[in-house]
Each structure stands twice: as C-alpha cells, then as structure tokens.
Image (cartoon, grey):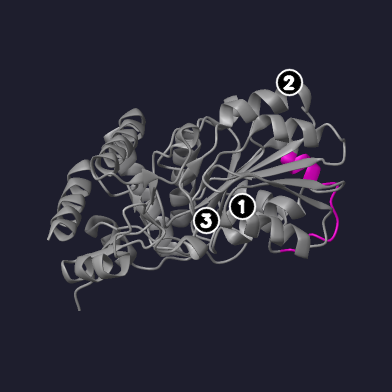
Amino acid sequence: MKFAKLFIPGPTHVSDNLLEEFSNPQIGHRTPEISQIIEYIVKGVQKLLYTKNHIYLVSHAATGLWEMGTKNSVQKGVLHAVNGAFSSKWALSSEQLGFQTKRLDFDWGSGVDINSVDKELSSGKYDVFAMVHNETSTGAMSNLDEISNLLRSKYPDIIWLVDSVSSMAGAKIEVDKLGIDFILSSTQKAWGLPAGFSICAVSDRMIKKSEKMINKGYFLDILTYEKYFLKNQTPSTPSIPHMYGMKKVLELIDKEGQENRWKRHMEMSKYTRDWVDSHNQKLFTKNDAISCTLTCVRNVKDWDIEKISQKLLNSGYRMDRGYGKFRYKTFRIPHMGNIYLDDLKEYLNVFEDLICK
C-alpha cells in the first residue's frame, strides 16, 4: 500500500532514512548499549535547547507531560494562558486534577500578551505559569523573550511550564537564557519521527519543587525520572525504536547545523506566507505571532477545502483542513522537520494547479 506524503501539522512526514532506524534490533533496556544511546540523546537535546537542564525521555504522548509539569509544581495555583485548542486542553487537565486553575483567555490566532499575564500574576494567587509556545491549532507562536523578561524581573519565584510540541527542533529556544523550568515536546512534529515518544527538560529548581509535592503518583514523578536520569536509564522499558530514531535525528541536525536548521524553518515560513498572499488569502494568525513551523490560512476565498483535499490525496499528498471549529474556514500548511523548501514548493505547486483548474 502506498501512503500519501503528510502535509498535516502532526504527525509529520517521516523520511525513509529515519524509518529505517525503527527496524533496528531490540536491545535490553538495562544494558550499557541503551545507556550509551540515552547519553547521546540527552547531550544532543541539551545542545539543541542551549541548556544544562536534565532531559527526561518518556514513552508516551506529550499530553502526559502536561500532568508531569503541574503535578510536580502546583501548590497555590496555576495560571494557564489559553489561545487555542491545546492550551485550552492543558488548562482542562489542571482543572480535572483539582488544582486551583485560572484560564487567561486570548483571541485564537494571537500570542500570549505579557500585560495581561502581568496583571493576573500580580494577584499573588499563583506559583506556576503554563503556556503553549506554538499553538498548533492556530499557528500562533508567542514571544518567549517577552515572557522571560516579565517573569525574571517581577515574578522570579514563579515556575514556568512551556509546551513546545510543535516548535522544539524547529525553532530556536534558548532554555537557560530564558529561564524555562519545564519544557516539553513530542516526536511527531518538528522532530520528524513517529508519534508515541516525548521529551522534557527540567530545571534544578523544578526538581527541588517536586521534592515538596505530595500525591504525585509514581509514573509522572520527576524524582522517579531523576533517579534513572542519573544512570542514563528510564524508569520503565522505553520505546527503543524511538531511541534509535532520536539518535539519528540528532545526528542529522548536527550535520545540517542548528543555525541552518532554524534558518530553513524561517525561510519556509516566509515562502508560505508569500504564497498565501499571492493567492489573496489571509493569515489566521496575527502578525506579531507568526510561526516558523506552521502557517494557518484564513479561507477568505472560500475554496472548497474538502474537494481540494481529495484531489491532493489523489495526487499523493495529505493536506490539513483546519482544526475543530475552524475546519474548512481555515487550513494549515506545516513546514517543519523533514520538510525542506523544495518539498514545500512541490506541494504548493500541486496545490496551485488544482485550485487553478
């Protein structure tokens, strides 16, 4: 069976050389061989994120890391910036865990506004601030530098949690410089690997905060992961094929060069926005929240997205048709991971041929 090339925001296209890594033999998860692979991955992710923070490798969806973040940090209350579907779901997770939770709502398509965050944090009701860096549902990327400056200058005791599921490995995120305490991602977007594996970077003060927390359970307890991190292991049997894949991706990133990788993603974003403008469509995302990994288009020309989607599928491409309540009113064009400018041009040329017929 031949499958269409994925041009959806996740899972994204996995190149053949990465898929091959998943056919490597299984090895024991308590052997020196797996510890060597884990050590390589940890150092690679630290380099990618410009951090000395500890890296935990987790064999489940990043949704679970939402709860790892809050269960290990929230004592007073958590302020959630909500500007799309996934930041809303993270807030729902905190509510259902019973935390004192406040949703700070922003228009979908906009980034997180620091003035609103400042006003709410000044109440003193919260010890944790949680946000999504790149809201996959809308393609809105928030300015981490602005948030960092606010927290460092006025709220240095606040624990900062960041979901970077659709930005890590596609956007430059200088974790230590920013002061992010807990940043999470998963492999099926800008990492360009199959779904089912997640990564987080955890600061020393997040680990110390976890020591004060109760009722964390075992599986998502940071102290459990820390114990095994120090031995280059994982608490339970990991997805070893994903380990092979992560190692290979990091080798490819090292070969490409990190700065070149960030530049590639920004160039593809610019090319996509120019394409959108040339067809008299509009961006759904506000101009100050442009993403380098994903472009969300407002379908003002009322194109028949379902019809175009089917034609693209017949041509060998799987397109996005918009998320949730914005299906058909928007559509998203991903440009991350294993997608290069030539791939993007090829896809948009086929797309253009279909809408011009």
Number of residue marks: 3
Label 2 residue SS: helix
**Which segment did they paint magenta?**
206-218
Q: Which residue matches tag 1? A: 87
* Residue 53 found in image quarter: top right
Q: Which residue matches tag 3? A: 198
Q: In this view, does 132 lie to the left or right of 15?
A: right
Q: Which of 111 and 276 is in front in this view?
A: 276
Q: Does the magenta stretch include residue 211?
A: yes
Of the residues tagged 2 and 1, which is closer to the observer? 1
Q: Residues within 10 Å of mark 2 (few under 14, many from 20)?
A: few
Counting from the top left corner in percent of width and height, residue 95 is at 77, 60
Q: Considering only vertical position in the picture, is 219 above or below 261?
A: below
Which badge, 3 or 1, is on the more N-terminal residue?
Answer: 1
Q: Considering only vertical position in the picture, is 121 above or below 109?
A: above
Mark 3–mark 1 Cα distance, whole angstroms, equals: 17 Å
Residue at far top of view: 153
Of the residues tagged 3 and 2, which is closer to the observer? 2
Residue at image point 55% right, 32% down = 143
Mark 2–mark 1 Cα distance, whole angstroms, equals: 25 Å
Residue 118 visible in the current orientation: yes
Residue at image point 56% right, 39% down = 111
Q: Is residue 88 left or right of residue 349?
A: right
Residue 217 visible in the current orientation: no
Q: In this view, does 195 lie to the left or right of 8?
A: right
